[in-house]
Image (tube, rainbow, N blue to C red):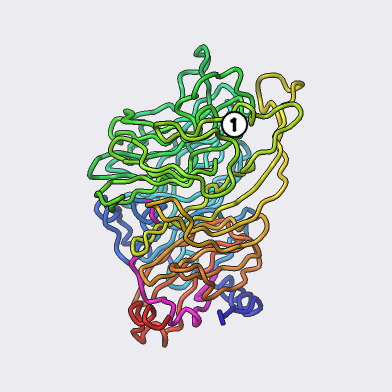
Amino acid sequence: MPKKLALDSVLRLLSVAALGSIVTLPNLAAAQNLTNQDILHPSKDSWPSYHGDYTGRRHSSLTQINAHNVHDLTLAWAFQTDQPATIKSSPLLVDGILYFSVPDNVWAVDARSGHMIWHFNHPTTEGDHIGHRGVAMYKDSLFFVTPDAHLISLNAKDGTIRWDKVIADVKKGYWSTVAPLVVHNHVIVGVGGDLDNITGLLRSFDPETGEVQWEWDATPPPGTPGKTTGGMTWITGTYDPELNLLYWGTGNPTPVLNGKPRPGDDEWTCSIVALNPDTGKLAWGFSASPHDTHDWDAVEVPMLVDANFHGQPRKMLMQSSRNGYFFVLDRTNGKSLLTTPFGPVNWALGIDKDGRPIPNPDKEPKPDGRLIAPDEGGMTNYRSPSFDPKTGLFIVDAHPSWSVYFAKPADGDYGWAGADYGLWGKGVIEAIDYQTGKIRWSHDVGRGGSGAGVLTTDSGLTFTGDGEGNFIVLSTDDGKTLWHAGTGSGMQTSPITYELDGRQYVLEGSGSVMFAWALPQSVAGSGAHSSEARGSR
């Protein structure tokens, strides 16, 4: 039977760890220096970027924790932020120091013990404090965005400010939650905001000076006749160093639910775009939801996979989109290889010759309502998926759901211009075969979903969460539960893993607590690896 770690044991350990977390250990941060090569080729004792590496696959080659010993997994430490905000950030690990965030706050924490090294607070009252995805690092500087759409550079050793630059004007309705992405000598950030007449954008900053290097706008300038605004860029993209292309997803057009004032496909909203990271010039774009009228961002992780597709080697981009479709593209040119739903979808008439869904005009919001699948939250959202290269499975926290969308003439043509009411939804972890789009297995995680992202490892394990606040470990082969532990709160982070001093840790945030799980030292040093585990199942 899968083993569950009792919640009272977790809380006892948490109380001890929280007492320790007030200790300041500045000498531990003395060696912080992250190079481009460290980001390009992460070592097992690091997690140097939001996704862990440039591909967005969120897969690790670590094998110490496996199906043979996962039942021994225990709490190594827990860190309480003492902030009301839920942790949504994915931690960074560089030279034994973890960095994670909530809006306006960044912590540096010893990755072995959970002791706090420093804490930075940037008090703001403006902007949307909906969440924070994490930080980026280059050399000895950290970079994080604020709810009032600033990009701040901190000294990684002590959390002091180096520079503070404006990404976009909060007075116009911009805010920012994205984890920056470092490519070469570029710190690339995106924005959020749902007001009419503001344009989604990416900006590249010089890491040393904070000067703007380039800007890419998702839509034409506000006021362009017949053109939309929107296309926000609030989830971290990915990067292919061989092609020197940056990949990013964009958000919904505005007005949000009313498409009449913005005819056409509304490029490049609800799209996947490829840009030159040195210039910001668009190489290609793919519209995941042409002329969106349901608030379905396509910001979900544009994952990069090199493998055979139908017998031919391909450089692919995969995305499980909020609109309910799973896309596989040739990332050299943006051409479609596969488009298929990964749950109930009823808003499209079919797929066009370019692999794009064809919107059904009758499924746009109407005064008498329209039953739509999926709901406004989407078939998935910002939580990260994972790709396991051994099984060829794309694993995602999915949300099959239904809602009723209304147009409200009294709202006029602009603003939200309508409403949606969720009817039903549940959470499932789905394993999608990228060759066919077929769901190989699914694992229910509760009504409403879990909110957690997914991490896989070479030992055949999938780490994620459920809707009851349990951190769970599944078999990547078949989705069966191998272990779970209650954390006392829901999870909205994507797990990471690393190995220090011969011990593998897995981190995930729950509520305002960051939990670190590991095997007991006696088990971690026993040498039981994934080859044993696979033979024992």
Pointer 1 local density, CA inside 10 Å: few below 14, some 14–19, many at least 20: many
- In the shown orientation, is residue 313 left or right of residue 381? left
- In the shown orientation, is residue 359 left or right of residue 210? right
Q: Nearer the viewer, residue 75 or 326?
A: 326
Q: Which segment is the magenta one? A: 56-78
Residue drawn at 64 percent across, 31 percent down = 363
Residue farthest to the left?
Answer: 242
Which quadrant of the rendered structure holds the C terminus? bottom left
Which quadrant of the rendered structure holds the N terminus? bottom right
On the image, numbered disc 1 is attached to which residue? 194
In this rendering, is residue 284 above or below 413? Answer: below
Residue farthest to the top?
Answer: 225
In this rendering, is residue 292 above or below 227? Answer: below
Q: Secondary structure at mark 1?
A: loop
Question: Residue 272: horizontal and vertical position, in percent?
Answer: 42, 36
Q: Quadrant of residue 181 in the image?
A: top left
- Residue 270 on the magenta span: no
Q: Quadrant of residue 330 in the image?
A: top left
Residue drawn at 60 percent across, 68 percent down = 470
Q: Is residue 116 visible?
A: yes
Question: Residue 435: horizontal and vertical position, in percent?
Answer: 37, 52
Q: Nearer the viewer, residue 400 or 147?
A: 400
Question: Residue 177: horizontal and vertical position, in percent?
Answer: 52, 43
Q: Nearer the viewer, residue 412 or 324?
A: 324
Q: Nearer the viewer, residue 68 or 328?
A: 328
The amino acid type of the residue labelled 1 equals Asp
Residue drawn at 69 percent across, 42 percent down = 403
Question: Residue 461: horizontal and vertical position, in percent?
Answer: 44, 70
State how many labels appear: 1
Q: Is residue 232 visible?
A: no
Residue drawn at 72 percent across, 31 percent down = 406
